[in-house]
Amino acid sequence: MLEVRGAHASGADVPVTIHNISETGLLIECEAALSIRDRIDIDLPHAGVVPATLVWVSGRMFGCQFDAPISPAALSAAQLRSAIAIEEASPPSSVPEQDSVSVGPHSSSFAANLKRLRMAKGLSQANMAERLGVSGPSISGWEKGRARPKEDRLADLAHLLGVPVSQLLVDPQPDMIHDLIDASREQIARATGVAPEKVRIIVEF
């Protein structure tokens, strides 16, 4: 993730957090009340101010498409800056916090499920930490697989995300995911009037 400055077409400053970025667009999180087709300028490292249009909205999460693709160098600069920011924000100690327990090598399923469900709910790590009464580094540690919530926290976490506890703990079923992607591709193709093979869906865990 990368914190950057943005500016709405109205001229208002919009602090945003970039969750994902490619040469053609990016996924951001911000507190501003934005809508599809709104215009926003994003200040990116190396590229400077880049204009984009909102094409997807879910809570505080917004999908944006650049007016023109950014260069590979600009993309690399943003990714590098994000990696540095994450490293600087990481807690210096690997000892689990009071609301976490140590985990073994099989914690990747929980970590991936938690991140996917949190983003689908439109929650930032800070929002989730506040609503659960835990620290921000705890959420980051859970999503990176370094630790896992204590048992008494799991029920609260599942309730916040609107899922049963079991959905947090099990691996996604590959066949079910492929079927869901295929069905979604067909729906998007019908809605946009393009061939299904022209629809590209990216799933990030």
Image (cartoon, helix red, strand yellow):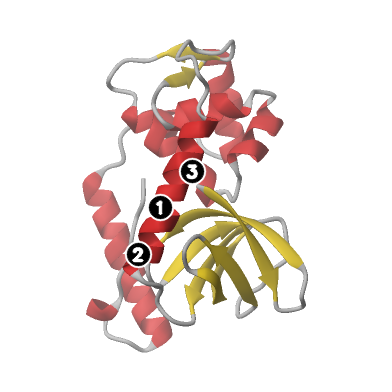
Crowdedness near tag 2: few (<14), some (14–19) or many (≥20) residues, C-alpha within 10 Å? few
Vertical comparison of 3 with 42: above or below: above
**Are there few (<14), some (14-19), or many (20+) residues within 10 Å of tag 1?**
some
Instruction: Classify mark 3: residues with Cα within 10 Å, few (<14), some (14-19) or many (20+).
Output: some
Identify the element where label 3 is drawn: helix
Numbered circles on residues, count: 3
User: Residue visible at 65% across and 23% down?
Assistant: 134
Residue at left offset 55%, top offset 59%: 28
19 vs 160, left or right, is left
Q: CA distance from mark 3 to mark 1?
A: 23 Å
Location of mark 3 (residue): 117
State the image coordinates of residue 111 (x, y, percent, origin top left): 40, 32
Q: Residue at the location (49% across, 14% down)?
A: 93
Q: Position of residue 101 (x, y in %)?
A: 47, 12
What's the distance in space between the residues labelled 1 and 2, CA to CA?
A: 10 Å
Name the spot of residue 165 as percent of width and height, x first.
48, 28
Quickly name the residue at label 1: 79
- The residue labelled by disc 2 is 73
Left or right: 157 in relation to 199: right
Between residue 199 and residue 191, name the one nearer to us: 199
Asked if marks 1 and 2 touch (Cβ < 8 Å), the reply is no
Judging from the image, what secondary structure is the residue with disc 1 in? helix
Q: Check whether the beta carbons of the residues at disc 3 and disc 1 lie within 8 A of each other.
A: no
Q: Quadrant of the C terminus?
A: top left
Q: Amino acid at mark 2?
A: Ala
Which x, y percent locates residue 119?
52, 48
